[in-house]
């Protein structure tokens, strides 16, 4: 599944057909993720439902431009920032 320290922290639940159905996340990691989602400074806060659609579209377009220009971060760095 995930090939990182995070991938070694979580456990996957499969059904009798071998299909992954759920993920078990250690409580400490779960609390870190929830805290990050609730912290507006993290950049991971829940989306403001009152944000205008035009702003959401503009943000998406800017993100796509940056991705096309190669201005992206490795996934490992993003996970390391979350775990820090």
Image (cartoon, helix red, strand yellow):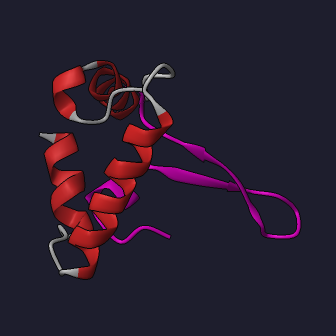
Which stretch did the figure color magenta?
1-27
Count of numbered badges drawn on the protein = 0
Where is residue 27, by image quadrant?
A: top left
Taking the spot 79% from the left edge, 70% from the top edge, the residue there is 18
Task: Tell me residue 10's x, y (percent).
Answer: 45, 49
**Above or below: residue 27 compared with residue 77:** above
Residue 8 shows up from this direction: no
Near-viewer residue (66 or 10): 66
The quadrant holding residue 12 is: bottom right
Quadrant location, the C terminus: top left
> Is residue 42 in the magenta section?
no
Residue at the farthest right position: 16
Indicate the position of residue 55 as horizontal and vertical percent values: 37, 39
Is residue 73 placed above or below 21 in the rendered structure?
A: below
Residue 77 located left or right of residue 5: left
Most foreground residue, 84 or 64: 64
When asked about the image quadrant of residue 38, the answer is: top left
Residue that appears at 45% across and 30% down? 52
**Can the viewer see residue 25 in this picture?**
yes
Q: Position of residue 3 (x, y in %)?
A: 36, 72
Asked whether 5 falls inside the magenta stretch, the response is: yes
Residue at horizontal 34 percent and vertical 32 percent from the top? 33
Front residue of 42/68: it is: 68
Q: Nearer the viewer, residue 27 or 76?
A: 76
Task: Name above or below for residue 26 compared with residue 38.
Answer: below
Q: Is residue 79 left or right of residue 7?
A: left
Q: Is residue 8 left or right of residue 41?
A: right
| Residue in the image at 15% along x and 61% along y | 77
């Amino acid at each position: 599944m995930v090939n990182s320290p995070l991938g070694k922290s979580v456990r996957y639940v499969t059904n009798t057909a071998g299909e992954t159905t759920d993920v078990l996340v250690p409580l400490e990691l779960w609390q870190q993720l929830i805290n990050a989602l609730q912290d507006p400074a993290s950049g991971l806060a829940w989306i403001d439902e009152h944000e205008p659609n035009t702003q959401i579209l503009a943000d998406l377009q800017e993100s796509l431009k940056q991705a096309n220009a190669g201005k992206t971060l490795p996934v490992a760095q993003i996970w390391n920032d979350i775990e820090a």
